Image: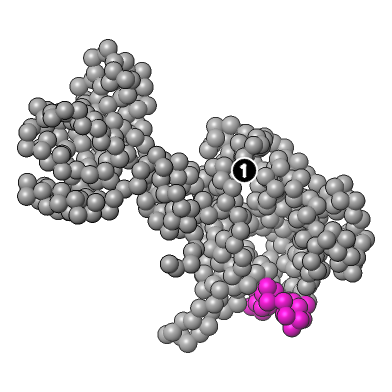
Amino acid sequence: MRAARRANLAALRARGRDPFLETRFDVTAHASELLERYANLSAEEQPPQVTFSVAGRLLGLRKMGKGAVWADVWDRSGRLQIYVRADAVGEEAFAAFDALDLGDIIGVSGTVFRSKKGDLTLRVARFEVLAKSLAPTPDKWHGLGDVEKRYRQRYVDLMIDERVRRIFLTRSAIVAEMRRFCDAHGFVECETPTMLHVAGGAAARPFRTHHNALGLDLDLRIATELNLKRLIVGGLERVYEIGRIWRNEGIDTTHNPEFTMLELYAAYWSLHEMMDFNETLFAHVVEKVHASSDVKYGERTLSFARPFRRMAYFEALAQWGGLDRATLLDPAGAARSLAEMGLPPSATHAQALDKIFERVVEPRLIDPTFVYDYPVALSPLAKRKAGDSDLVDRYELFAANFELSNAFTELNDPDDQRARFEAQIEERKRGNDEVPAPDWDFVTALEYGMPPTAGIGIGVDRVVMLLTGQQSIREVILFPLQRPL
């Protein structure tokens, strides 16, 4: 098949139509625009005599005798049928059309009409071959059957599967809407380093790299938190970043080692104000993307109409697991509860609490639910709850059984922060390599004074999963990490 395609390329070049010499094509419309604009045009109506130029990939070809061809051109917005006649484009040009293969990229100009079968069609008056596909194109109806091959050759996946294109166009729209919403609420978008001397702000194992010129071992960031809070100290007051995060940990349906996070910090806000902002942001994005507050995910329909359900952490564990707070706050008690559930032992108190919550509570969190008042063991950078030193001012937002966002009233007492870093050093000595090394300069920053601040991290990939109905995070990442062939 490749040999036949190369022969067709040679035939095009012999006719003076070398596709690889073309430098531009003046696109005046996309397929979806024409389909929407002329949605009510009937087959009996006189079509408008307006010339449109469309470019895209040839993914359907139906020859009707010697002098006519019906074909499908796919651009980023969808499919448009075209009709090419020898008496309209000229015999020489029509002969060149005969050298086209599925997958070739063409530009066509002409007027629209409605075919007898009811399809809006472009009657081609002129066409150009803009690129030749030398590799055979998979059948667009069956696509790439191998999931791993879909991820490895995402360019082919996008080319032949309109559903996949819609996912990533929707992803772009979601991120743009998040950015607009943050900007409209007075937040300043910032860019912080991805290579750090110390990767902090989360409990995760970092990826390591080496800077040759400086002779430095560096970590890829596991969060943008500490640098964004330095900007709060500096007086920017409301900051956010949408950026890549790297965590050297496992891969599953909701975790990928490289992912996108929206982190946002607001000086002078309480956790309840951040919760209200979080709720409004999600309701807004869902409405913009779906034109509804309802989201279909699997067999369920989730409602993002405000207000979202709100539950305390230990309230949820008591309601659905019959577990009491005193037992779980005791490391030995949490370990016993873990064993009683038939779960393997955990290295730390925090890991035990995480496993218990994942088993007991997360399966119940289908509609959007805020879970708040977390134990301090789970939150080394959060401020302790006033009047209850066992808890911190923290919440997480869950929907469809997984976490979408994580928010805190940020710790701003430098002495408390120093003590927690010292405790983390002891954890590292006990072999927990997911505990980050202390960032002592961050303590110095706090010593200059950080105002009361609420902060939030939102997993962008998971939001996209939810709003596009995908069950795996790899379906919403263009090029998920894979082993080499």
- Tell me the residue that label 1 is attached to: 282
- Whole-percent x and y of residue 73? 29, 37
Give the farthest residue toward the bottom. 215
Does the rendering let one see residue 62? yes
> Magenta span covers which residues?
421-442
Q: Is residue 11 left or right of residue 140?
A: left
Does the rendering let one see residue 240? no
* Nearest to the observer: residue 231 or residue 422: 422
* Nearest to the observer: residue 134 or residue 458: 134
- Whether residue 40 appears in magenta in the rendering, the answer is no
Question: For the image shown, how many numbered marks are present on the structure?
Answer: 1
The amino acid sitting under disc 1 is Phe
* Nearest to the observer: residue 117 or residue 404: 117
- Whole-percent x and y of residue 230? 61, 68
Q: Quadrant of residue 342?
A: bottom right
Give the crowd class for mark 1: few <14, some 14-19, many >=20 residues within 10 Å.
some
Vertical placement of residue 293 versus 387, above or below: above
Question: Secondary structure under badge 1?
Answer: helix
Q: Quadrant of residue 382?
A: bottom right
Vertical placement of residue 85 versus 319, above or below: above
- Whole-percent x and y of residue 194? 51, 69
